[in-house]
Image (cartoon, rainbow, N blue to C red):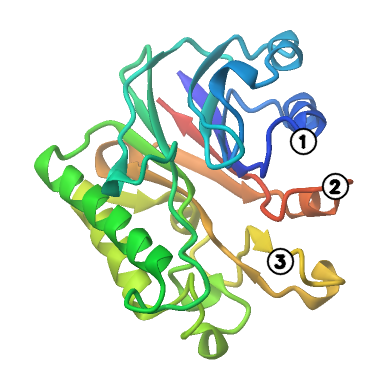
Amino acid sequence: MPFTLATWNINSVRLREGLVARLMAEEQPDILCLQECKSPVELIPLEQFQALGYGYMVARGQKGYNGVAILSKLPITDAGGKDFANLGHARHVAGRLENGVTIHNCYVPAGGDIPDRTQNEKFGQKLDFLTEMRDAFHGDRPQKSILVGDLNIAPRADDVWNHKQLLKIVSHTPIEVAHLTDTQAAGGFVDVTRADIPAGPLYSWWSYRSPDWDADDKGRRLDHIWATGDIAGAAHGSRILRTVRGWEQPSDHVPVFATFDL
């Protein structure tokens, strides 16, 4: 059963309902994972999405912050959600397809501006969130699983516009990269995007602070699609829809796609 999956930090699903519908209509992914929905589950605007064929949803939400949702054309059942680091945040939900594939949709905390947990509580929360994810995967190693989302870390030198300048900037510090790498290894996950596109600059986020994001191109690859080793070889067709950043009233993130022949 081949299917195409996309992940996108939408930065308010109600504010950007029209952009979600446009992506669904133009690109027609079978599964769309959203982060930072900023909505209670019951207020996610489903009518337009259902009219476009997305008849299934599993989600976790809260008012005004965080929130993750998996919208699907394919039957999908709720496989739970975890409150990593006990933050009380809606940052993880899992769904299971009829073919047994489990999809984890994650929104890792951004971590604030100072990369020091003694000075910045949010940075410590980010590291703890990743540590608990790592430990969960050690304790129950996933199989036939895909993990996607805004992981808020650009791990490689070519995942940021300037490696040296960003080494002390939250999202690209060595300690964050190490935590992300340990989490990936604990779950036996393969970075599908980089397996498909092994070299060269690749970004999925551009700051709202940049007056000309396209010309400046000071991006980072914060959004990821991983798959466990038992199914990673079935992935192909990875792409990042950079043009979406230029849509009207866009999110600062753009969708990341991959297709799986499973």
| Crowd band around label 1 with a 10 angstrom C-alpha radius: few (<14), some (14–19), many (20+) | some
Seen in the picture, residue 152 relative to 21 is either above or below; the reply is below
Point out the residue furthest to the left here: 139
Asked whether, in this view, residue 14 is left or right of residue 154, the answer is right
Residue carrying label 2: 249
Give the spatial CA distance, label 3 vs label 2.
13 Å
Q: What's the amino acid at mark 3?
A: Ser
Q: What's the amino acid at mark 1?
A: Arg
User: In the image, residue 168 lies at what x, y percent?
Assistant: 47, 85
Asked whether, in this view, residue 232 is left or right of residue 43, the answer is left
Give the spatial CA distance, label 1 vs label 3.
17 Å
At x 70%, y 25%, the residue is 28
Towards the viewer: 6 or 152: 152
Asked whether, in this view, residue 146 is left or right of residue 9, the answer is left
What is the secondary structure assignment of the residue under circle 1? loop
Point out the residue furthest to the bottom here: 164
Q: Quadrant of the C terminus?
A: top left
Asked whether, in this view, residue 95 is left or right of residue 143, the answer is right
Q: Quadrant of residue 258?
A: top right
Q: What's the amino acid at mark 2?
A: Gln
Q: Earlier in the sequence, mark 3 or mark 2?
A: 3
Q: Earlier in the sequence, mark 1 or mark 2?
A: 1
Residue carrying label 3: 207
Which label sits on residue 33?
A: none
At x 16%, y 40%, the residue is 141
User: In the image, residue 246 lies at what x, y percent?
Assistant: 85, 53
What is the secondary structure assignment of the residue under circle 3? loop
Residue carrying label 1: 16
